[in-house]
Amino acid sequence: MNCIWCLSPTSAAEPEEHIVPEGLVGGRPLPLRIYGANPSVRDVRLVLDRGEVCGGCNARNGKLDDAVQGYFGFLKPALNRVGTKSGKPATAARPGMYAERREDGVHVTINATDRTRVSPRGVSIGAAKQKADGVRLLPKERDAEGRAGFRLSQPSPLGRRVSRALHKVAFELVCFQVGAGPLLDPRFNPIRDYVSHGRGERRIAFCTKPDSATVLSPSMIFDDGRAVLRLPLESLGEPPSFGLMPCPLGTVEWVAELRLGVPYYIDVSPGNDLLRRFDPRHGSGYTFLVYDDRHGILNVSGAPES
């Protein structure tokens, strides 16, 4: 056996590799759909535990796992419905925000001041200030009845590091389905170089939902500058699930579907040229976009978003 990332020899004693970060979705079995001529869906524990990934690559790629968890911000506890390995509920923190999953939903505390504040459960929340990943309350236009309000703003730019992390998940999903052997072929080196070393440029497709941001009334902001809101369980959307769409040419080339709040489509082909050949299986309530390492966010026509 050889590692699918560095191609070095491995053994069955290598540490277990979680295909999807355990902190993001928990350690429970998750739905895996296989599209194509013989479609199927089954709940599986998405791990590689037969030496497909060496201990060194497991540790190095773990930094990409951290990046993608940070990308989702307060949506992370919405996606992780089972909590941590130690039995604690899923949490997320950014400058200006702390979120925790509880039995009745995800509780989000916002620090709307320029000083550190403490959540109702005693967690210190630093100020967002001018930090790029800070979560803020922004004024919202008055409604038809003249009522003022605020909306929650969580910047989550989909950049190269997050794209590499999603490609890592997709490549390991294919390994889970077909085994490590076919992926050791040198023609997959562009994907290895991209994920492990950040070399090259790739695209991914994803969907966004219409803006449904939670609106806070001024009365929800405490005198000390904190705002606490609850996202009910019924508003958190569908649980995470994953899918693989085989290339029509019958080769070991796939498009991976990662449903993490909204669908992300990752082209697992060496030349990154399959996206134009697949049918995105998202609902009509989504907007379809493409992220490109060189040009940023593109619309469905391939033109940069204005």
Image (cartoon, grey):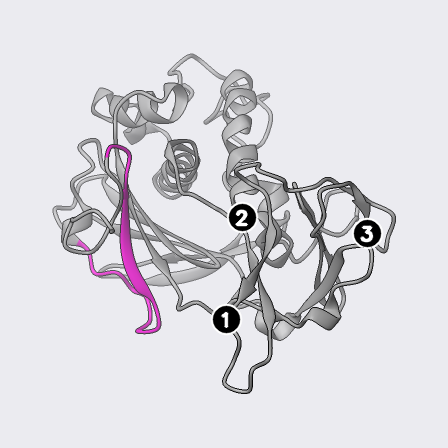
- The answer to whether residue 48 shows anywhere in this view is no
Residue at x-position 34% and y-position 58%? 207
Find residue 274 and report its horizontal and vertical position in percent.
18, 45
Within 10 Å of the Cα at label 3, are there few (<14), some (14-19), or many (20+) other Cα atoms?
some
The vertical placement of 289 against 48, above or below, is below
- The answer to whether residue 42 shows anywhere in this view is yes
Q: How far apart are the alpha carbons under marks 3 and 2?
A: 20 Å
Residue named by callout 2? 72
Q: Where is the N terminus found, in terms of image quarters?
A: top left
User: What stretch of residues is rendered in magenta?
Assistant: 278-294
Question: In the image, which disc is placed on residue 141?
Answer: 1
Question: In the image, which disc is placed on residue 119?
Answer: 3
What is the tally of numbered marks visible in this picture?
Answer: 3
User: Between residues 70 and 12, which one lies in front from this camera angle?
Assistant: 70
Which numbered disc flags the more N-terminal residue, 3 or 2?
2
Which numbered disc flags the more N-terminal residue, 1 or 2?
2
Circle nearer the viewer, 1 or 3:
1
- Which amino acid, mark 3? Ser
User: Viewed as shown, does residue 166 lie left or right of 64?
Assistant: left
Label 3: element kind = loop
Residue at x-position 14% and y-position 54%? 301
Q: Is residue 304 magenta?
A: no
Label 2: element kind = helix
Circle nearer the viewer, 3 or 2:
3
Q: Residue furthest left?
A: 249
